[in-house]
Image (cartoon, helix red, strand yellow):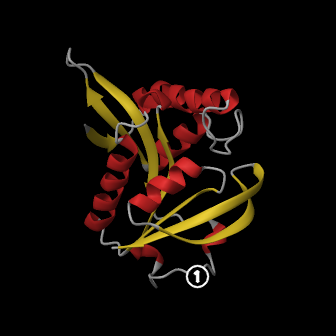
Amino acid sequence: MEFRKACMKDVDAIESIYDAIHDAEAEGTLTTGWLRGIYPVRQTALSAIERGDLFVGEETDAEGNKEIFGSAVINQIQVDVYEGAPWQKEAADDEVMVLHCLTIDPAKYGKGYGSAFAEFYEEYARENGCVSLRIDTNEKNVRARKMYASLGYTEIGIVPTVFNGIPNVMLVMLEKPL
């Protein structure tokens, strides 16, 4: 398993994961609170690649072929509702790393890929001199909330917002000091 910055050749695989998540949501086997056609979509990945902050996780199969199992945006862009939140650790903007839009192929759930991606994110933050990790997720996304809690993240607040074009989101803000 390895992690790297995404490139244009990865967009189809990333979009397929977004679609698989939307399919699982439609089937009722997953609840993220995301909406097909609104977020995440192909343009979500394209914009992040253009900014240089989209990462993919990939594994090598028995035949030596690499397959992307997930993606995430990792940067220092804090969403507007973070301002004024009761963060545990005071940190300047350049000391905070944020994980956005962590996606794992639903066919790969339960194999530790989400936790591994979070560990990569934490190491990336350390390497970039950050002292605070911040994440947000939809209140409905119980699976993500449980995973983040198991990794030592604390929910510091829940705020109503319009999130990436999705109305009426109760956004859970999480933090983990480094």
Residue 70: where, in percent of width, then height? Answer: 42, 37
Q: Position of residue 64 (x, y in %)?
A: 20, 19
Q: Label 1's element?
A: loop
Please state which of residues 117 and 44 is positioned toward the viewer in this rendering: 117
Residue at point 65%, 33% (across, down): 25
Q: Where is residue 83, by image quadrant?
A: bottom right
Vertical side of 122 occupied by 177: above or below? below
Q: Is residue 65 left or right of residue 11?
A: left
10 Å neighbourhood of mark 1: few (<14), some, or many (≥20)?
few
Q: Taking 70 as reference, is 126 left or right?
A: left
Q: Residue at x 43, y 35 (%)?
A: 109
Left or right: residue 86 versus residue 5 is right
Q: Return the residue at label 1.
A: 86
Question: Which residue appears at 58% of the width and 66% of the height?
Answer: 173
Question: How many callouts does the rendering have?
Answer: 1
Which residue is located at x 31 percent, y 42 percent?
4
Quarter the N terminus occupies: top left
Residue in the foreground of this view, choosing between 141 and 162: 141
Q: Quadrant of the C terminus?
A: bottom left
Q: What's under tag 1, amino acid-wise? A: Pro
Percent x, y of residue 164: 69, 51
Question: Residue 61: image x %, image y %?
Answer: 25, 21
